[in-house]
Image (cartoon, rainbow, N blue to C red):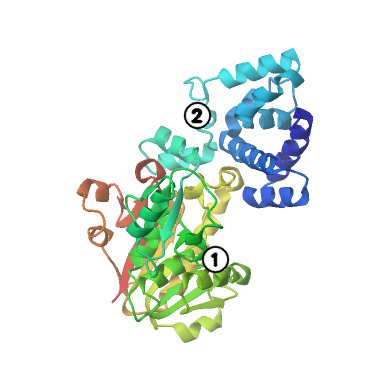
Amino acid sequence: MQLKFFFEHATALLREVFQWQSPADACVANYVKAHRTLGARDRAMLADVVFTVLRHRLHWESLAKQSPWDRWSSLAILGSREQASEWANEMTAEQVAWLVKAQAMDPNASDLPLDQRWNLPHWLIERLRAQGVEDMPALAQALNQPAPVDLRANVQRVKRDKLLREMQAAGWDVCATPLSPWGIRMQKRRALAQTDWFKAGDLEAQDEGSQLLAWLVGAKRGEVIADFCAGAGGKALAMGAAMRGQGRLYAIDTSAHRLEGLRPRMARSGLQEIYSLAIADEHDSRLNALHGRMNRVLVDAPCSGLGTIRRSPELKWRVQPEDIESLARQQFSILSSAARLVKEQGRLVYATCSLLREENEAIAQRFDTEHSDFVRVSVDDLMKSLVKDEATRNSMLSEGGLRLWPQIHGTDGFFAAVWERR
């Protein structure tokens, strides 16, 4: 790819992503679909540039101010990393000198402002510090690294260890996840969709933290369970596999389009007892028929998603501080509505993939106060059968809930609280 051709596409794509109208991966997918002349290597490089720029935006934008290129070209060339050297003969001496100097800059230099050093918005740094996050440099570093690819073995069809041995024998660099009993971690990204394991429904892509949320629900054979904010149904599939297909599972969401994504995944997994229900909102009257019928309900509530920055770095810039208050109101309303579905002695699990206390512990504490018919279940007790080391378990506990951190546990940032109806 020539430098001029690269700039044409990279800058156009960055401009589109930086409008913050849709997720970065969707922007990239739509762009390459509209430019079919791009080769496979070009498409991969453009995607890499976008996500690398999003991770390092603040520091690189400060370097771009002294650049002989415009803002977008400067970000694009910095994001191209090792490929940039291929275009040295197409640059002026001034451009080469700036690029060499910019690449040599220490992004962790102590004289840089914290938001540039950590590539996090100032408001988020302040929120995290205020809630007592102790090792902010380690958290920032973890958030700015690409996440590994975690897979979940479909235990209804195959044992995790058997699948792991098969993949390793076939030359895949994989290992068991340290926490989830269903998880397999890929050390290097490889295409899954065309493998026999994927086609047979033996595995699904799912972060280890997300697998643990499904595990906390404790789904058992013959039970009636609801995944109240199911999306495309990843956790519903995990719970269905744990039930060995025996029982009834409702995948509930306000997006019929997202629920449609569950159909092919169900067919591949071999599960049949999952019923999709698209609702208008958490107060939809169609939920009345389900009140008091559920053994277990999982509420993976809509949230800021700030725990998934490793996968979706644009969230650092798309999410604004004023969004958090409205999200918290919605989260509590959804949790309160979902609680009505739980039968006596049934279990309720609330979860988000946020780092912020306002969306996590604060919601759980408010629910404790306003719903005396529910009592907290000890997350520590639930985790003892899975995590034997007490120090590791203690690192996962927060105000009676489960807290997972990317810099400590290697997962996305997750929170979960568990109750039982009296």
Looking at the image, is 399 positioned above or below residue 48?
Answer: below
Q: Report the label total.
A: 2
Q: Residue 314: x percent and y percent?
A: 59, 44
Horizontally, residue 24 falls left or right of residue 276, namely right
- The answer to whether any part of residue 73 appears in the image is yes
Horizontally, residue 33 falls left or right of residue 125, namely right
Could you tell me which residue is drawn at 72 percent across and 37 percent down?
10
Q: Please name the amino acid that badge 2 sits on.
A: Leu
Horizontally, residue 114 falls left or right of residue 381, namely right
Q: Please name the amino acid that badge 1 sits on.
A: Ala
Residue 72 lies in quadrant: top right
* Image quarter (top left, top right, bottom left or bottom right) of the N terminus: top right
222, 163: nearer the viewer: 163
Looking at the image, is 397 positioned above or below residue 347?
Answer: above
79, 216: nearer the viewer: 79
Q: Residue 319: x percent and y percent?
A: 58, 48
Could you tell me which residue is drawn at 56 percent across and 18 percent down?
104
Residue at which label 2 appears: 114
Q: Residue 268: x percent and y percent?
A: 51, 69
* Image quarter (top left, top right, bottom left or bottom right) of the C terminus: bottom left
Could you tell me which residue is drawn at 62 percent across and 17 percent down?
100
The Cα–Cα distance between marks 1 and 2, rounded to whole angstroms, is 37 Å
Are there few (<14), some (14-19), or many (20+) residues within 10 Å of tag 2? some
Residue at which label 1 appears: 232
For label 2, the SS is helix
